[in-house]
Image: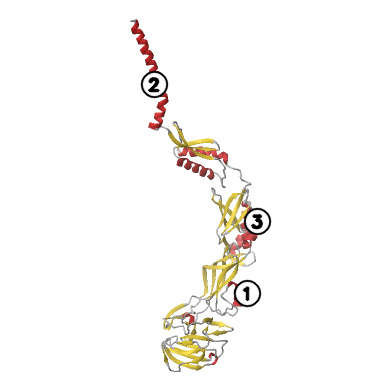
Amino acid sequence: MERLSRYGRRMKLTLLKTTTVACFVCILIIPFLTKTLFKTEANYYSITINGIKVGAANTEEEVIVALASARQELSAQYEDVVYMDPDIEIVKEKKTIAKRMSAEELSGAIYSCMFENVMDVDFKMAYTVRLGDFVVTMATKDDVVKLFEKLIEKYDPNNAFSVNLDALDAATGTYTINITEKAKESTAAEIVSSAISGTAVSQDGATVANGDGLIGITFDEEVTVVEISGDNAVTTSVDEAYENITKEHAEKTIYTVEAGDTLSGIAQSHGLSLSELLGLNPNLSVESVIAPGDAIIITVPKSEISVLTKYQMTYEEDYEAEPIYQDDDIHYRGTNTVISEGTVGHRSVIAEVSYSNGNETGRTYIKETIMTESVPKTIAVGTLTPPTYLRPISGGSFSSGYGYRWGSFHKGVDWYVPQGTTVTAAAAGTVTRAGWYGDYGYCVDITHDNGTMTRYGHLSAVKVSSGQRVSQGQAIAASGNTGYSTGPHLHFEIWIGGSPVNPLNYVNKN
């Protein structure tokens, strides 16, 4: 009996030890197995602002979306751009137990926290003004407005328009300039006067219709204003910015030569010396001959801004009705014949006139009242296709064009070629002149089957005779320097319908 009791106690002690070891093993191993085998640990992302943990969400994307939403909501509460300088940290967390928020809850928490990080920037901002490619930085919004008020001042002497700096995007601090007409105020006397007479008196004393005057101001260039940190910004005064913007500089452009133009005349009319004009056009010299249609490089004064203004104007004027054109199946294209002259009419018009920096750029008629009807001119327009002509010489250089020169009308074109160069018939026909012909010197005329005529002047030798039939490209003469000529060259004319035309409309210049 005693032996059994001792055995039982031994068994109880063994069981106790075994149970204790088993519990200890479970405490150590079960968390490890849970973590490695069942992977119950939670992965999530938290956001910390200035060292304060604000909240957490399941994914990094949810945190970023919540942050952006909070920023946008905060910016919407302010008229101007909101500047914040928080220390933001998004961290991936690994904990068994995690408290996560919905994107909306997290956005609200971030929004509340960010209120403490809004910076006071009343005296730390500057404003970059961009006009096309030109950039200037102003110290304040008021300076920006004053700058544009100064730019439009001379176009708005009655101060009828106001400059507004309107926000395009408060979140990015982007603004635009809008110029709007101020509300018009009229005295009782002015209202009664206008109602009775239907007119009003302008500032300069001229009587104009109601509504006439400046109706719009804008700019040709794209204008943007961006708010920036003013800590290190180099700002410009209103007066200095105005001077830099309006200061004119030379800008290259193309001028198309017209009949009667000379190099010296073109230079003078555009404020250039002849040497300056030639410097812009290295292919030209003092001796160069220019022809209508030639392109010449010139410079014109240009500022950094083009102020566009629009005026309404009411006035009376003489006018001519648009011509009536009729097909002429007898003459060639380029031959216009006036069948009947029209008459001048008279009308009252209301027009919108556009200007760029004070120079008219367009005119649109809004309303017209005809007082005397204009009878339109009738013009017959040739429809026949003109014959094909060949250039009468090979080589040489173009030296003089068709049209007015030196006070007289030049009926053809000239090519400089060495004396004795072969001259060929521009088209097939019959020789109707072959010999000396006054200022033309030795000359050949060829009448073609369609009634047109070509003339070749200042020849040194004639190789055909009057009445002879010639083919296109046949040698008819040698170039020279006879008659009224300043040097060896070929003078060439084309006559259609009994009148000279510009040969360059039919043959190549070079």
Determine if residue 481 is in view.
Answer: yes
Quick check: 245 above or below 49?
Answer: below
462 relative position to 265: left or right: left
Which is nearer the N-term, disc 2 or disc 3? 2
How dense is the environment of label 3, judged by Cα within 10 Å: few (below 14), some, or many (20 and up)?
A: some
Query: Which mark, residue 22?
Result: 2
**Residue count near mark 2 (Cα–Cα under 10 Å), binned few <14, some 14–19, many ≥20:** few
Q: Which residue is mark 1?
A: 275
Residue type, numbered disc 2:
Ala
Amino acid tagged 3 = Val
Under circle 3, the secondary element is: helix
Q: Is residue 399 left or right of residue 201?
A: left
Which residue occupies the foreground of this view, 468 or 416? 416
Per the image, label 2 sits on a secondary structure element best described as helix
Up-down relation of residue 345 to residue 177 (above or below): below
Residue placed at 49% from the left, 43% from the top? 69
Give the label, 2 or 3, closer to the camera. Answer: 2
Q: Are marks 1 and 2 in contact (CB under 8 Å)?
A: no
Q: Is residue 183 above or below residue 265?
A: above
In the rendered image, the residue lying farthest to the top is 1
Q: Which residue is mark 3?
A: 238
Q: CA distance from mark 2 to mark 3?
A: 87 Å
> Along the polypeptide, which appears first: circle 1 or circle 3?
3
Tell me the SS state at disc 1: helix
